[in-house]
């Protein structure tokens, strides 16, 4: 459903948020280890998240990745998905057809439209903050 980069981006953002709740900045190595992703790949994903103002990066000996306190509670999964994969998941055809629409639907158009709508609602209403709290409390995990 999501690209591998998007999956890692969501996991990385949850981890960075959890650490940011306690005013901790995390290094690239910390993030890559926490989400079980190669450092070079993680670096590219984090760059995209910084570019899209999802996370912040500070260089130097006291630097690292963080999420500003004022943004922690409002950041949603949807914002990360759009930053990394774009909005195709919210608008695209279930079979990948370019010409699929209400007037010229593909065979799964109506069923996929409902699923896509429910997915969009879930991604837009689920905050990274709530997921980070679940992680911190031990109710969820990021590693396999």
Image (cartoon, helix red, strand yellow):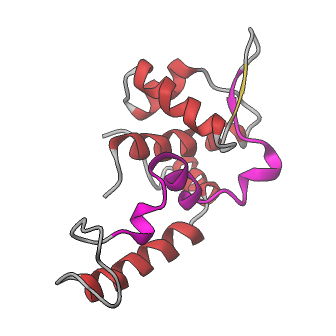
Quarter holding the C terminus? top left
Q: Which of 115/125 is in front?
A: 115
Q: Position of residue 82 (x, y in %)?
A: 52, 55
Q: Looking at the image, which residue sits at the far left?
A: 107
> Which residue appears farthest toward the top when viewing the image?
61
Residue at image position (44%, 50%) is 85
State the residue at coordinates (43%, 19%): 39
Q: Is residue 60 above or below residue 44?
A: above
For the point 66% across and 44% down, which residue is it? 54
| Total number of numbered discs in the rendering | 0
Q: Nearer the viewer, residue 113 or 122?
A: 113
| Above/below status of 101 relative to 91 | below
- Across and down, in percent, residue 91 comes to 42, 71
Query: Which is more toward the observer, 130 or 60?
Result: 60
* 14 in the magenta segment: no
Quarter of image, res 133: bottom right
- Where is residue 98 drawn, in percent x and y? 29, 67
Identify whether 106 is placed above or below 82: below
Q: Residue at x 74, y 8 (%)?
A: 61
> Depth check: 113 or 55 in front?
113
Q: Which quadrant of the rendered structure holds the N terminus?
A: bottom left
Magenta part of the chain: 64-92
24 displayed left or right of 38: right
Relative to residue 14, is residue 90 depicted above or below? below
In the picture provided, is 45 more to the left or to the right than 111? right
**Residue 32 % position (x, y):** 46, 26
């Amino acid at each position: 459903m999501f690209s591998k980069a998007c999956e890692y981006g969501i996991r990385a953002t949850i981890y960075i948020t959890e650490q940011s709740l306690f005013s901790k900045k995390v290094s690239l190595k910390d993030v890559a280890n926490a989400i079980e992703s190669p450092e070079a790949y993680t670096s590219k994903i984090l760059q995209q998240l910084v570019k899209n103002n999802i996370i912040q990066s500070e260089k130097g000996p006291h630097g690292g990745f963080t999420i500003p306190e004022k943004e922690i509670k409002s950041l949603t999964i949807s914002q990360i998905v759009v930053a990394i994969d774009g909005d195709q998941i919210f608008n695209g055809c279930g079979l990948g057809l370019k010409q699929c629409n209400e007037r010229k639907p593909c065979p799964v158009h109506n069923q996929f439209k409902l699923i896509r709508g429910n997915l969009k609602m879930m991604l837009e209403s689920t905050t990274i903050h709530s997921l980070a709290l679940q992680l911190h409390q031990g109710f969820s995990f990021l590693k396999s």
